[in-house]
Amino acid sequence: MSLVADPPIVSADGRQSPTALAVARGTQRLLVAHGMACVAELPLASGRRADLVALRHDGELWIVEIKSSIADFRVDQKWPDYRTHCDRLFFATAVHVPSDIFPMEAGLIIADAYGAELIREAPEHRLHAATRRSMMLAFAHAAARRLQALHDPTGPYGEG
């Protein structure tokens, strides 16, 4: 018997389902295992909010759109808009969601709360330099503000 329980999977804003939170957690573990740093729920210049943004050591940026069900995928058709903010676009989903509903124009990750598997690589579409700079600054700013908020929960950090 383990003395350390799994940490609860808690949504900061209450919008994500337990399945989506589990998929996000497992996907982040996969991305970190591939040497990437991740920021969840990153606001984009377009006004959209990316579920996960991952930054590789060489500056390559991935966006992962999490879909917890067939209905979640069908009602949310904004995913093509994310292409202008990343080098590679992926969907991440749970094992019970049929993988054939996801377009071939994006990569595919299957995940649960404990890990994930990269099923299909995403096609590369390199960002323009100015967009890459903007995304990297947004990523760094959000990560730093969230870290500051952990150290000083009552501080004036706002949403990051």
Image (cartoon, rainbow, N blue to C red):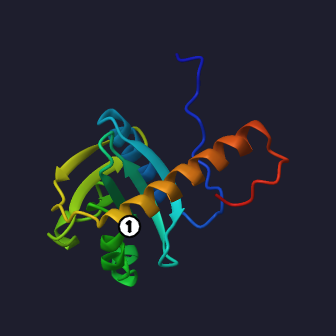
User: Looking at the rendering, which quadrant does residue 115 occupy?
Assistant: top left
| Vertical arrangement, residue 83 with respect to residue 78, above or below | above
Q: Which residue was labeled with disc 1?
A: 131
- Describe residue 18's horizontal placement relative to residue 69 as left or right: right
Check disc 1 and give the amino acid type: Thr
Q: Bin the neighbour count of mark 1 within 10 Å (Cα to Cα): few under 14, some 14-19, many 20 and up.
A: some
| Vertical arrangement, residue 41 with respect to residue 146, above or below | below
Q: Position of residue 113 (x, y in %)?
A: 43, 43
- Taking the spot 29% from the left edge, 67% from the top edge, the residue there is 128
- Describe residue 133's horizontal placement relative to residue 88 as left or right: right
- Taking the spot 17% from the left edge, 71% from the top edge, the residue there is 105
User: Looking at the rendering, which quadrant does residue 99 occupy?
Assistant: bottom left
Q: Secondary structure at mark 1?
A: helix
User: Looking at the rendering, which quadrant does residue 53 occupy?
Assistant: bottom left
Front in this rendered view, residue 126 or 115: 126
- Describe residue 149's horizontal placement relative to residue 51 as left or right: right
In this orientation, does residue 75 appear? yes
- Describe residue 61's horizontal placement relative to residue 88 as left or right: right
Q: Position of residue 104 (x, y in %)?
A: 14, 69
Q: Position of residue 97 (x, y in %)?
A: 29, 63
- Taking the spot 17% from the left edge, 61% from the top edge, the residue there is 124
